Image: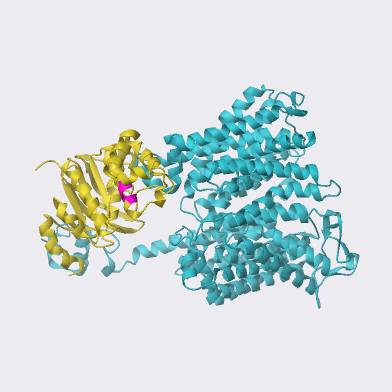
Amino acid sequence: MTTFLTYTVLGLVLGAVYSIAASGLVLTYNTSGIFNFAHGAQAMFGTFLYWHFTQVWNWPTWLGLIAVIGVAGPVMGAALHALIMKGLRGTADVTKIIVTVAVLLGTVYLAQWIWNPDEARTIDMFFGAGAKVTLAGVTVRYHEIVCLVAAVAIAALLRVLFTRSRAGVVMRGSVDDPDLLRLNGHDPERAAMLSWALGSTLAVLAGVLVVPISGGAMDANMLTLLVIDAFAAAMFGRLRSLPRTFAGAMVLGLTVTYVLAYLPSAGTFTGNLRVSLPMIILFVVLVVLPQDRLRGAAVRTRERYRVPSVRSAAVWGAVLIAVVYLYSLLLPDAGVTAFALGMTFAIVALSLTVLTGYAGELNLAPLSFGAIGTIVAFHFGVTGEGLAARLNVQGVLLGVLVAAVVGGLVALPALRLRGLYLALATMAFGVFLSNMVLRDTTEHEWFGQRFTIFPDGSLVIPPLKAGPLDLRDGTAFLMTATVLFALLGIGLAALRNSGYGRRLAAMKDSPAATAMLGQSLVRLKLSVFMISAGIAGLGGVLMSSAHGTVSQETFTITGSLALLMLVVVAGIGYISGALFGGLIAGVGSAVLVSTFNDLALEHESMSSLYTAVGQLVLVGTALVGMGVGRNPSGFVHDVAEAYRSLRAAKPVLYGGGAAGAVLYVLALTDVIGTWTFAIAALCVLMLLPVIGKSVLEEKGRRETPLELLGIDEPYTDELRARLDRELGLPATVRKGGAGVPA
Amino acid sequence: MTEPLLELSGVKAGYGAIEVLHGVDLALRPGTLLALLGPNGGGKSTAMRVIAGLHPATGGEVRYAGRTVNGISAQDAARLGICSIPEGRGVFPNLTVRENLWAATGTGARLKDMEEKAYGRFPILGKRRDQLAGSLSGGEQQMLALSRALGTDPAVLLLDELSMGLAPKIVSEMYETVAELVAGGLSVLVAEQFARAVLPIADSAALMLHGRIAATGTPDEIEDRLAGDYLGG
């Protein structure tokens, strides 16, 4: 009995912390309509600040608390709102998600830059771990009492704020209709900023409270994910009801604690289950709770994509293969291997283009489907031993098939879900997979077969061999991946131009209207999910093979989120967006960071500068993600639009092509280095539209035909006089052009 | 004639590159009801949004009681006594009736007075005070929206498409309330597609076509022109 009570108290304390974190989440969601994925990162950052104040600067506990909860938390929230979140009104769900994901990644990178993750840090309990009371045989620490009291007080205060104060009512109104709030004499931005400040403060408080009760050790990634567990609690209240969120948090805390207490502790199962339990609960809650009905009106958003024709996709596919081949000639072997890895990421990214760009559905865990493909290919597709080991085609195909089926299975319960809810369900699946399946290193016996899903925590995936094609050779691998990407890209363009593609686009714009036209939403969603998961599986198998050895670390949710973010930045509606996003995610930042680290090692005097620049690259990618709010269609869209206008300026295009060819020849003959070539070629690519524009403008100024004057500009007296003059009308000729004929 | 309380002179406005209002002139005299009529897409709603401060004017002048207020924010306009009820339903669907009235006190009214006036004029709202506004019927929602005009004691009331989606009986009830407000000294500008609903209580009317005021005059004069202009004659 005492054991039970002890665990119950522990569970309630954990639930209390979850409820504080979750209520902050509900608060910001209700006032701004943005589900803040960065909530955990804010908690993490505040907790590190608290550690820095109290441990490094030796401030007393109360001063440290005031500094982080009273100052840093609110300032962080208000700044987030003023700089980033304010610009997100009227954007698609995926844009909102990506921007907060970018904040999450940026905050984690920043924290790891400031506080070296290799050093151990701990936070003590309030009043020390020894301060405790014993009630009915149960020992309760003061810190735990503080957690419980804080949770109850915050729940009560928020309830009062939301229902008994005008400020709270205005906050709730601001998500419905900010314009109407203005007409009522309120400032919706002030209400939203207040709620972000409050939400951020609650996140920081939860972070400071949770670290000591979960062991005391601080790790930026762990801490961020710990607060993400609170998503499940928030979902109990469907992101609206605070009392239900509170109850959900308690259920979550108790379940997690009981699992740890009463399930057998042998093997890795219980530990893994305890870690992934919040995500399992999140998935179940999402699927079971009643959902919003289909929205009738079309969703108007700021994203705009052009649809390519199959012919142009084929031409560009051929161009891509040629360019990649020519470029691979310049690269050293290591470079070719890295490039091939990037190309496999681009294939995974294609799964997002069809799913999110074409069909408007969301998947936050594309790499998880890649992991499934990898596991299947490892178990069923490897022949030979050691260096002679090869992956066969059947194994890859089976991996793709299983990934597609699992994609369908995950999507099936989630079919009713839309937008954010679907995104959270896929995220829950991704975290569950990497915590349960990819950590499952114990031996199982199913149907008389003994096997281990993930032996030794890592899998060795050999290169593919299909007939005469052996991918051990780096260039062969790169070209195969490129050709596959091009073929898939052409296939997707054909898909988008087919009747099926138009049905997908219709579903994206208005599910209700699509259903009314007699389309089966279930069939559409299920099929597009399976296609997407299959592509992700294919890309995943190739990616693992390019890596050589993969572990749970390869398929983390952070990796998936970073990939998704970069694809959205590049333009998720475009096949080229998948190419650039995948390449940057797969190699771009890794190459840059390692380059700067190498530089740091080589030049000791400058090492701190180079290390800092390397870290800046990471934070910078996240900053780019935050910029999505301003330009939700992606940069590929802008570049394509710029080049579209260049069609009228053929000489500029030819000049650009010639410059590229000269650069290439120089690089091939080793006159300039590979890096110089890459940077110069990029400059030409980016500068061309600018030059073209100025050329076009000059032309345009000279060539407005007489009869079109005054159509897109005000029809002034001066203009009229000029027309008369040019037409040689006597009224103005006599008066010298200055007068106005009556 | 008295000085106009609200005046537009040569006001231009648009969305992006597309100009919707090409120089609109309007004047609302104190204590009168001006009906702004015209078919769909004529720019009535944009004109209303410009007056309320929700949309910037790109040219011309907006004047409140002779003072130029171009670029005023909507919340400042509301505090100066412009009460605007936008197209559709001017209520917060996820707040209760009482909370909606509470949100309406942003211009300085007191919740108690607000509730008294609203429930006194529309008893049905009193019965539903704790119900979510989104779950009210269309007529009840419009009553709630109109309650803001009753309780906040504004100088000018802007009504955009009060009749939209409502039964004719409710529309005439609504306009009766509006007529009472005008009799009590309030100045009202009504944008309306269905001229018949508002002309009987209007003091003057203006006809808006393609972003310009095509005609102004007494309700009778405008009514005679309506058929031809609506049908593109």
Occupied quadrant, residue A453: bottom right
Above or below, B33 relative to A352: above
Above or below, A422 relative to B76: below
Estimate the x, y position of residue A441 in percent, counting from the top left: 84, 54
User: In what quadrant of the picture does the C terminus of chain A appear?
Assistant: bottom left
- In the foreground, A113 or A18: A18
**Residue shown at 55%/61% (left/top)?**
A636
Query: Horizontal placement of A651 versus A353: left or right?
Result: left
Query: Residue B191: in sight, yes or no?
Result: yes
Occupied quadrant, residue B62: top left
Above or below, A107 relative to A440: above
Residue projecting furthest to the left: B1
User: In what quadrant of the picture does the N terminus of chain A appear?
Assistant: top right
Estimate the x, y position of residue A314 in percent, counting from the top left: 59, 75
The yellow-tinted chain is B
**Residue shown at 84%/45% (left/top)?**
A265
Q: Does the magenta stretch include residue B144?
A: yes
Colouring used for the render = by chain
Question: Which stretch is magenta?
Answer: B140-145
The cyan-tinted chain is A
Occupied quadrant, residue A185: top left
**Residue shown at 23%/52% (left/top)?**
B173
Estimate the x, y position of residue A266 in percent, counting from the top left: 86, 47
Above or below, B11 relative to A359: above
Estimate the x, y position of residue A99 in percent, counting from the top left: 56, 50
- In the foreground, B129 or A250: B129
Q: Is residue A724 magenta?
A: no
